[in-house]
Image (cartoon, helix red, strand yellow):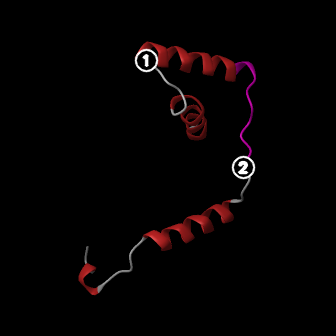
Amino acid sequence: MERWFGLLTDKLIRRGVHTSVKALEDDIRAWIDSWNENPRPFTWTKTADEILKSLTDYLSKVTPPATENQQGT
């Protein structure tokens, strides 16, 4: 479900120019109707191990090293 909402966001909300909430709502409903006419299953392209390794690599880059002053937090 989360990936479906990601697609909706990427393909419609971020790319769209909506002049009102009603216009946005109409576009979302049309996108949902189109999706339901031709639903497509999601296919994972990476294994769980590949995803976890990628996440571990990313976290090691963005997490600052622990210092003695950070103990107990």
Q: Residue at x 51, y 29 (%)?
A: 13
Say left or right for 71 vs 6.
Answer: left
> Which numbered marker is on residue 10?
none
Picture quarter with the N terminus: top right
Work out whether residue 33 or residue 16 is closer to the camera in this orientation and state it: 16
Which image quarter is the C terminus in? Answer: bottom left
Indicate yes or no whether the magenta region holds residue 43.
yes
Q: Secondary structure at mark 1?
A: loop
Q: What is the x, y in percent for residue 71?
A: 27, 81
Circle 1 residues within 10 Å: few <14, some 14–19, many ≥20: few
Q: Are marks 1 and 2 in contact (CB under 8 Å)?
A: no
**Element type at marker 2?**
loop
- Front position among marks 1 and 2: 1
Residue 46 position, x and y percent, is 72, 57
Picture quadrant of residue 53: bottom right
Q: Position of residue 9 (x, y in %)?
A: 54, 34
Amino acid found under the numbered disc labelled 1: Thr
**Residue 27 location (% of width, % of height):** 55, 18
User: Over which residues does the magenta segment extend?
Assistant: 36-44
What residue is at 72 percent from the left and 49 percent from the top? Answer: 44
Task: Tell me if residue 72 is in the magenta stretch.
Answer: no
Q: Is residue 14 left or right of residue 51?
A: left
- Residue at x 60% of width, y 40% of height: 3
Which is nearer the eye, 72 or 31?
31
Residue annotated with mark 2: 44
Mark 1–mark 2 Cα distance, whole angstroms, equals 36 Å
- The first of marks 1 and 2 along the sequence is 1
Relative to 57, residue 18 above or below? above
| Residue type, mark 2 in image | Trp
Residue hosting label 1: 19
Q: Residue at x 49, y 24 (%)?
A: 17
